[in-house]
Structure formats: structure tokens, C-alpha cells
Amino acid sequence: MLQRTITAIFFSAAMIGGIFCGKYTFFLLFGCITAGSLWELFGLLFHEDRYLFTRRTAGTLWALSPFLLLGGSALGYWGGSAAFSGIIAIIFSAAPFFILELFLHPERPFDNVGRYLLGMAYLGIPFCLLVYLSMPLGEFFTSGDYSPWRVFGLLALVWTNDTMAYLIGSTLGKRKLLERISPKKTWEGFIGGGICTALLAWGVSGYLDAFTPTQWVGLAVVATIFGTLGDLVESMLKRSVGIKDSGSLLPGHGGLLDRFDAFIFAIPFYWLALIIL
């Protein structure tokens, strides 16, 4: 318990400092989180491969590129033309993964290529979208004003839902949500977490203008549904490879992927909700 508490204190301080100290620390913080999460993901996907280090390195660098190239352009670090060039570079840089399989002689080469593409879709693109969510939505590939409260608000909704679902589910839960994947999750926890998250969103909507009141409530719904699904998806992944935690970077809490699984899965749906609302 003491180890978990100490880790939580340092983790919270790093998150708050990285988000609120400006767009440079935000970019550095989530660049590290993206890279670390990708490293853990490819460690899970290729955990029995004899070329594990090579595959993790190649996959992490490739799936990190949207965050660096497109996200950096959105924050104004380099011009919009660099973003379009980055898209072309990312598309063509996928070809070496097919070529790599020609020389590594795996039994199922296209399974391995699919794992690289999964890393891009599951982590690379969502974390890139987070950069765009950190500022008022406008035309893609244009720089804007970074808003730390937008990022913190999106995180707070997911983590409120996760925390309250656990507390309510562990005390009142009786009906299993998806026992095959996560035996501890219950419908009571899911509903209770959703209600608490919606109340938080409604309560802060009158004080924080990062989003409109309608958007706050809509984002709370997204956090409840897709945050829960994201947690289940990562649990399914870990069960499929027989691993309890995605990593050991955060003592007592597991890895980065364990801490951000719900948030990662919710990011694209956050973006969609803000487009609609």
C-alpha cells in the first residue's frame, strides 16, 4: 500500500506539472507516455518473438511518428506543410515492415505486420488526436492555443469513472459486467461510475469554460462507455498473452498502458463527440 501511495503521489505531480506548465511540457510528457505505452504494447504483442527488441524498437518509433510530426505541427513547433509531409512519410514508412518479414523468416509474417498496424491504430493515432483535443477544434494541421484544462478535464472524467466504478462495484456490485474478461467489473459499478462522472461534468461546467455544458455532459457519457470498454480491451489483450501487468514502470500500479488504457480508447470518441456537439 505504501509503495502504491508513493507512486501515485509522484505520478500525479508529474501529470499535473506536465499538463499545466505549458504546451512544451505537455508535448514532452505525452510524448514519453506515448513512447512508453507503445513499448509495453509491442512487448505484449511480440513477447515470444526472438527478435523482440528489434520489433519493439521499430514499432515504437513508427507508431510514435504521428504524435511527433502531426502533433508538433498542431502546437506550432513547425509549419503545417510539415504535417502533410509527415503523413506521406508515415504511409511510405510502413513498407519496411513488409520487407523486414522477408528476411526474418517468421512463420506468420502478416500477423506480425498486423501487430505493427495495431500499434499505430490503438495508440499512435489516439495520442496524436489528443494534441488536437488540447485546443479549440479548428481546421486540422493548423496551430492553436493550448488549453491545459481541456486535457486535464478529459483525463479527470475517465479517472473519475474508473475510480467510482471500482468503489461502488466493490461495495454494491452483484451483477457481473463481463466476467470472462474482468471478473471484478459489475453493472452496478458501471452505472454508479457513470452517474458520478456525469455529476462531476455538470458541476464543473459552470466554472470551467474549456467545453460548453452540453459538451461536458457528452464527454462524461463517452468517458463512461468507452473508458470502460478500453479497460476491458486491455484486459482482453493481457489475458490473451497470459500477462498480468503491461509493465512495471509504476511500482504497485503496473505499466503506463495499465494506467491509460481507458483514456486511450476514449480519445477518438472524445474527438467525435466534440465534432457533433
Image: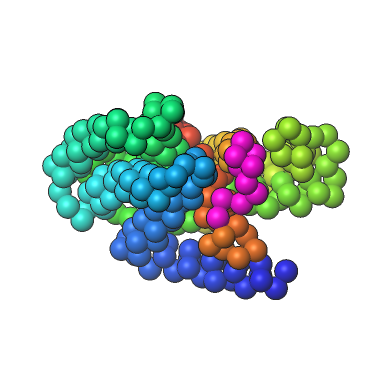
Q: Nearer the viewer, residue 83 or 144?
A: 83
The answer to whether residue 261 is visible is yes
Q: Position of residue 230 (x, y in %)?
A: 57, 39
Image height of 122 relative to 34, above or below = above
Q: Position of residue 83 (x, y in %)?
A: 20, 42
In the image, what residue occupies the spot 61% across and 51% down? 245
Q: Which residues are magenta?
A: 238-247
Main SS of the magenta part reads loop
Q: Nearer the viewer, residue 156 or 267?
A: 267
Question: On the rendered structure, is 140 left or right of 50?
Answer: left
Question: On the rendered structure, is 133 left or right of 183?
Answer: left
Image height of 21 relative to 179, above or below = below
The answer to whether residue 87 is visible is no
Quadrant of the frame with the N terminus: bottom right
Q: Position of residue 220 (x, y in %)?
A: 58, 42
Image height of 171 relative to 84, above or below = below
Q: Is residue 53 magenta?
A: no
Q: Nearer the viewer, residue 185 or 242?
A: 242
Quadrant of the frame with the C terminus: top left
Report the label total.
0
Q: Position of residue 90 (x, y in %)?
A: 24, 38
In the image, what residue occupies the spot 29% across and 34% down? 103
In the image, what residue occupies the spot 35% across and 65% down? 25
Question: On the rendered structure, is 164 left or right of 79?
Answer: right
In the image, what residue occupies the spot 40% across and 32% down? 106
